[in-house]
């Protein structure tokens, strides 16, 4: 694969991933969405299907890493680093494009949500409602969860550990695919397995932090949230932003080390 193929494939694939993954978060969160309040099961399966679609679409171009933690782990495993910048650049750009497309698809819903007094507070709002309280929290605005992750309980070491553990599970599952097939991988079946692993991580480990398990998935949309002209959007919680970047990268490196010791 050439560097241009890698960059184009990762840009397209990560854009699809964030469009569909962020899209299900918007569908569940925003007023005037038919899927509002569909719940955590909808989000976890929505992200799983997003992974399935993105991997299946772009695997022929770039191998569909779609995650800097996966790229890092594969570089450690194989000792090949020359393509890492192309992968990471495509992943970050794709994540930003995907987040912008979510905003475009839900433009009217974003406006309705962020001008509703029950959501953002102000005269006439019920100050005790959960949404108004959420909107007044420092750092994170009322729709940031559509773009990026955040902890339910803000304990730095626990939030970091949760992201590390979840990423180890995901990346180790990716690295071990195809070991029973002469090392040739599982082809299109691998996309389904990876998607189901993402669903499993979300259901089992996603509750504390929202399971970024992917630095580009969190950082790119957070940048877009900061840039978009959303009314009453609140903060982008940059004080937390390093955790869903550092945690998955650490987890990816640990998974690669486990693989090299136990499976190689």
Image (spheres, grey):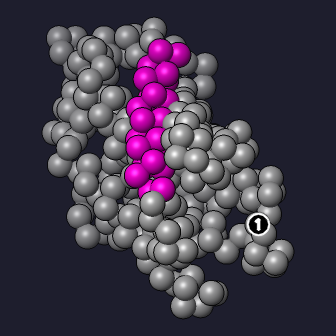
Q: How far from the left and from the top, in percent, is residue 61?
A: 66, 43
**Residue at (76% x, 66% y) in the render:** 185
Magenta residues (range): 83-106
Find out whether residue 87 is within the magenta segment. Answer: yes
Quarter of the C terminus within the rendering: bottom right
Q: How far from the left and from the top, in percent, is residue 5?
A: 59, 41
Nearest the viewer among 200 and 66 is 66
Compared with 225, 6 (above or below) is: below
* Quadrant of the image occupied by residue 153: bottom left
Dot 1 corresponds to which residue? 185
**Residue at (33% x, 48% y) in the render:** 150
**Residue at (48% x, 82% y) in the render:** 257
Give the dominant element type of the magenta stretch: helix, strand or loop: helix
- Total residue callouts: 1
Find out whether residue 115 is within the magenta segment. Answer: no
* Quadrant of the image occupied by residue 160: bottom left
Q: Is 78 left, or right, of 192 in this rendering?
A: left
Furthest residue toward bottom: 261
Nearest the viewer among 82 and 72 is 82
Nearest the viewer among 158 and 38 is 158
Nearest the viewer among 239 and 63 is 63
Q: Say whether residue 97 is visible.
A: yes
Q: How far from the left and from the top, in percent, is residue 173?
A: 63, 70
Q: Is 117 left, or right, of 13 in this rendering?
A: left
**Residue at (61% x, 19% y) in the render:** 34
Compared with 113, 53 (above or below) is: below
Compared with 37, 70 (above or below) is: below
Q: How far from the left and from the top, in percent, is residue 125?
A: 24, 17
């Amino acid at each position: 694969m050439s560097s241009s193929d890698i960059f184009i494939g990762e840009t397209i694939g990560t854009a699809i991933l964030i469009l569909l993954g962020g899209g299900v978060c918007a569908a569940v969160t925003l007023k005037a969405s038919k899927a509002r309040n569909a719940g955590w099961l909808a989000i976890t399966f929505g992200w799983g299907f997003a992974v399935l679609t993105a991997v299946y679409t772009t695997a022929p171009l770039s191998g569909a890493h779609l995650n800097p933690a996966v790229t890092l782990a594969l570089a450690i495993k194989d000792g090949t680093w020359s393509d890492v910048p192309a992968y990471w650049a495509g992943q970050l750009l794709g994540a930003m494009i995907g987040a912008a497309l979510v905003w475009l698809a839900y433009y009217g819903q974003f406006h309705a949500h962020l001008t509703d007094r029950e959501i953002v507070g102000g005269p006439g709002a019920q100050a005790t409602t959960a949404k108004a309280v959420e909107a007044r929290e420092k750092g994170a605005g009322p729709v940031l969860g559509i773009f990026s992750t955040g902890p339910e309980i803000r304990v730095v070491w626990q939030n970091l550990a949760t992201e590390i553990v979840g990423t180890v599970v995901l990346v180790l599952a990716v690295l071990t695919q195809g070991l029973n097939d002469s090392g040739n991988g599982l082809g299109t079946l691998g996309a389904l397995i990876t998607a189901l692993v993402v669903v499993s991580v979300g259901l089992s480990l996603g509750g504390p932090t929202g399971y970024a398990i992917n630095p580009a998935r969190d950082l790119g949309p957070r940048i877009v949230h900061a840039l978009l002209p959303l009314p009453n959007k609140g903060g982008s919680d940059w004080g937390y932003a390093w955790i869903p970047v550092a945690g998955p990268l650490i987890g990816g490196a640990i998974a690669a080390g486990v693989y090299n010791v136990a499976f190689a």
